Amino acid sequence: MTLKPLSGIRVLDFTALPPGGACTIMLADLGAEIIRIESPAQKGKPSLVIGQVALSRGKQSLTLDQRHPGANELLMRLVKHVDIIVENAKPGVMEARGFGYAQASAANPSLIWCAITGFGQTGPNADHAGHDISYVAHSGLLGALSAELPWQPAISLALQAGALSAVIAIQSALIQRGKTGHGAFIDLSLSESAGWFLNCGINPLSDRPLALPASPDRRLYACADNRFIVIACAEARTWGALCDQLGLAEYKDQLHKWQDAKEMTRILSEIFASKPAADWVQQLAASGAAVTIVNHASQLLNDPQILARRSVVMASGVPVPANPVRIMAPGGEETGTTTQAPHQVGQDTADVLRDAGFSNEEILGLEQGGVI
């Protein structure tokens, strides 16, 4: 069995929202042991991050009433046996409860604490409420993706960007700890994570840093089966290959110098409407033209590339995206994706506490006292 990169790393997960859930599931896929802290009122229910199996696979569940007077004493003992804490409370909330980074790091100086918030721990927006669109809007990304406002994305962007940023930060802190022996506090802002996308622009802080306007060589075209392909033939080589395949050699020298862009788009639209999308991909991609089918999420289940690479896996009967991080061991084994079913809330409370040195009598007393 391949030893995963984060095997032996234990994480206390105080998060209940997608940024933390997406962060810790990636850590889990890389081998970390994830222990979710959940309310005793939810005992026996599936341990799910807002109902999502994809973000909840195989994580352990420990119940704890954080408002109980005995909760902090338990956490101060438990924190000595973990490497990482991930939380998404508003700045100052954990400290106000008596269990923040200052208290936890005093008990475990090697602890890495990752605090995921909308706008960061400091600044005038630090206490502002928000959702994904709030952070995408504040970051500049919303305006960069479309010059025409109002519009809003149909999928979260800042939340996933923040989760990936958190994973990078945590792994970097682990490397630093290996050199110094000391832990760290990570101040992770979802707005700043979304703003990182602006680096893709030639001038990152211009009003249109991601200016990639639709043109005949770079746009979506409808096909005969009502599916779309996207053409991305922005170089002379790829545009030339497309023109050769479509019998349009006379237009090869018009790339970025369109005599009539609308007419060129009309010509291509008529051609692509004559055959199914998959047929065009098969014909054109092999020639060097950059053409890709446009998938909706459900169509990934039958996409040849997805199937070949097992980019979707089944977890508890639900298809979920596989972890994109593929670290190959010398023998060829990959890190893989955790497909274990979500645990039940509280399922692992006793085991986790025993591992941290709690006796059976102590655990029973904590349960009877309403702490766990």
Image (cartoon, rainbow, N blue to C red):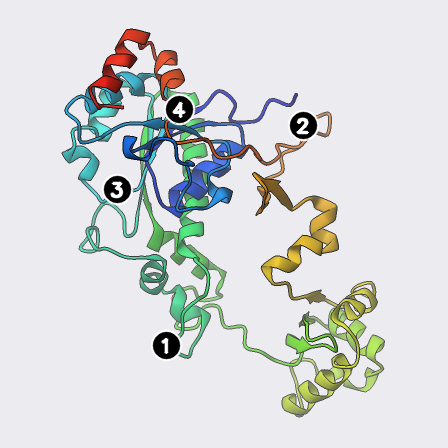
Residue 359 appears in view? no
> Which residue corresponds to the image point at 18% horizontal and 21% vertical from the top-left?
70
Disc 3 crowd, CA 10 A, few/some/many (<14, 14-19, 20+): some
Residue 236 appears in view? yes
Q: Identity of the amino acid at label 4?
A: Arg
Q: Identity of the amino acid at label 1?
A: Pro
* Element under disc 1: loop
Instruction: From the image, tell me which residue sits under label 4.
Output: 177
Disc 4 crowd, CA 10 A, few/some/many (<14, 14-19, 20+): some
Residue 68, image x, y percentages: 17, 27
Instruction: From the image, tell me which residue sits under label 3.
Output: 89
Report if the CB atoms under discs 1 and 3 are less than 8 Å apart.
no
* Element under disc 4: helix
Which quadrant of the rendered structure holds the N terminus?
Answer: top right
Disc 2 crowd, CA 10 A, few/some/many (<14, 14-19, 20+): few
* Element under disc 2: loop
Instruction: From the image, tell me which residue sits under label 2.
Output: 329
Instruction: From the image, tell me which residue sits under label 1.
Output: 150
Report if the CB atoms under discs 3 and 4 are less than 8 Å apart.
no
> Which one is in front, 56 or 28?
56
> Which residue corresponds to the image point at 48% horizontal and 27% vertical from the top-left?
32
Between the residue at mark 2 and the residue at mark 3, the CA separation in whole angstroms equals 37 Å
> Which one is in front, 144 or 278?
278
In the drawing, does residue 229 fall left or right of residue 93?
right
Between the residue at mark 4 and the residue at mark 2, the CA separation in whole angstroms equals 24 Å
Query: Which of label 4 and label 2 is nearer to you?
Result: 2
Between the residue at mark 3 and the residue at mark 4, the CA separation in whole angstroms equals 24 Å
Residue 246, image x, y percentages: 82, 79
Q: Identity of the amino acid at label 3?
A: Ala
